[in-house]
């Protein structure tokens, strides 16, 4: 999945021949994928099972993150707008409930794929630490300290 070898040609990363079957991403998708913020990740994760309106996304993201992600309305809607532009999320209807308008959002196939790939990348990165036997990590030396 990662460990991509290749070169940039215009706005595309062209994969090298080291690992056949690598995908070629437009630069914008590659940058968005590599720089996914925790809030974006949990907004996408909140939409995995069903379409949700804004407040439900906020509550579900907070629940899924164990309370780490607490989205303000401005952050939520700016992020949703970006995710819609990237075609990871789509506006999926509106309804009026108790006199209040609600816009619903759904995860697209592209959004589901990028979410799964991001989860796999994070899991692989975590394994670097979690698979290492306890007690084998060395402390960093303070500058000027001799061996």
Image (cartoon, rainbow, N blue to C red):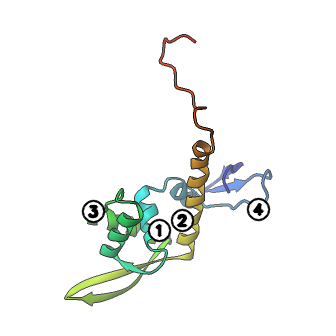
Mark closer to the chain start, 2 or 1: 1
Q: Which residue is mark 4?
A: 21
Residue mark closest to the camera, 4 vs 1: 1
Quarter of the figure that contains the N terminus: bottom right
Classify mark 1: residues with Cα within 10 Å, few (<14), some (14-19) or many (20+): many
Q: Which residue is mark 3?
A: 72
Q: Residue at x 33, y 75 (%)?
A: 56
Q: CA distance from mark 4 to mark 1?
A: 26 Å
Classify mark 4: residues with Cα within 10 Å, few (<14), some (14-19) or many (20+): few
Instruction: Identify the mark at residue 45; answer none if there is no mark.
Output: 1
Mark closer to the chain start, 3 or 1: 1
Q: Disc 3, disc 4: CB below 8 Å? A: no
Q: Residue at x 62, y 40 (%)?
A: 132
Q: Is residue 133 left or right of residue 53?
A: right
Q: CA distance from mark 2 to mark 4?
A: 20 Å
Quarter of the image where one finds residue 91? bottom left
């Amino acid at each position: 999945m990662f460990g991509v070898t290749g070169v940039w040609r215009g706005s595309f990363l062209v994969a090298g021949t080291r690992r056949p079957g690598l995908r070629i991403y437009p630069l914008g998708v590659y940058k968005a994928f590599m720089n996914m913020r925790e809030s974006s990740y949990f907004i996408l994760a909140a939409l995995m099972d069903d379409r949700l309106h804004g407040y439900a996304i906020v509550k579900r993201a907070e629940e899924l993150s164990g309370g780490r992600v607490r989205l303000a309305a401005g952050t939520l809607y700016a992020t949703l707008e970006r995710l819609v532009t990237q075609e990871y999320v789509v506006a999926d209807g509106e309804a009026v409930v108790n006199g209040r308008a609600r816009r619903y959002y759904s995860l697209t196939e592209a959004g589901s794929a990028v979410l799964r790939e991001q989860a796999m990348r994070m899991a692989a990165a975590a394994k670097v630490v979690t698979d290492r036997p306890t007690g084998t990590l060395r402390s960093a030396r303070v500058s000027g300290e001799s061996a």
